Amino acid sequence: MSAIRPDLPAVTPQAAGDAPAVRNAQAAFFRAAMAQVQAPQPQTASAPRAVQTTVAPTTTASAEPTRMARPGSLLDIRV
């Protein structure tokens, strides 16, 4: 098999000499992130309020009857 671009030198990547330093930095970052997530979050000063939702009344005469969905209507296939 011939090379696609023979003018480029065939260089294999060398192992980085600072790989342990990089791993240690990543480990420290993730340890700090996990410690922040696992730490208890401070409570807000105000108490949470109850949320009241209102639903518009519907009548069976004015509401459209429910129909069965067409087969494949939820698929996102384009030809």
Image (cartoon, rainbow, N blue to C red):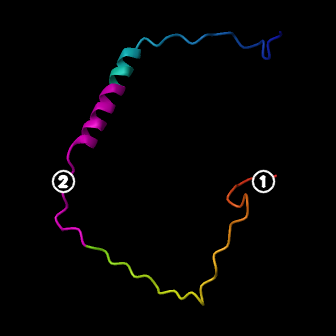
Q: Give the range drawn in magenta.
A: 26-49
* Disc sitting over residue 42 in the figure: 2
What is the spatial separation of the Cα atoms under label 1 and label 2, in whole angstroms?
49 Å
Decide which of 72, 3 is in the foreground and name it.
72
Looking at the rendered structure, the kind of residue marked 1 is Arg
Residue 57 in percent (x, y) is at 47, 87
Q: Nearer the viewer, residue 74 or 31?
A: 74
Residue holding disc 1: 78
Report helix, strand or loop for mark 1. Answer: loop
Q: Are there few (<14), some (14-19), or many (20+) residues within 10 Å of tag 2?
A: few
- Residue at x-position 21% and y-position 43%: 39
Please name the amino acid that badge 2 sits on. Pro
Residue depicted at x 53% and y 10% = 14
Q: Which label sits on residue 9?
A: none
Residue 38, by quadrant, is top left
Of 41 and 61, the residue lying toward us: 61
Classify the position of the N terminus by image quarter.
top right
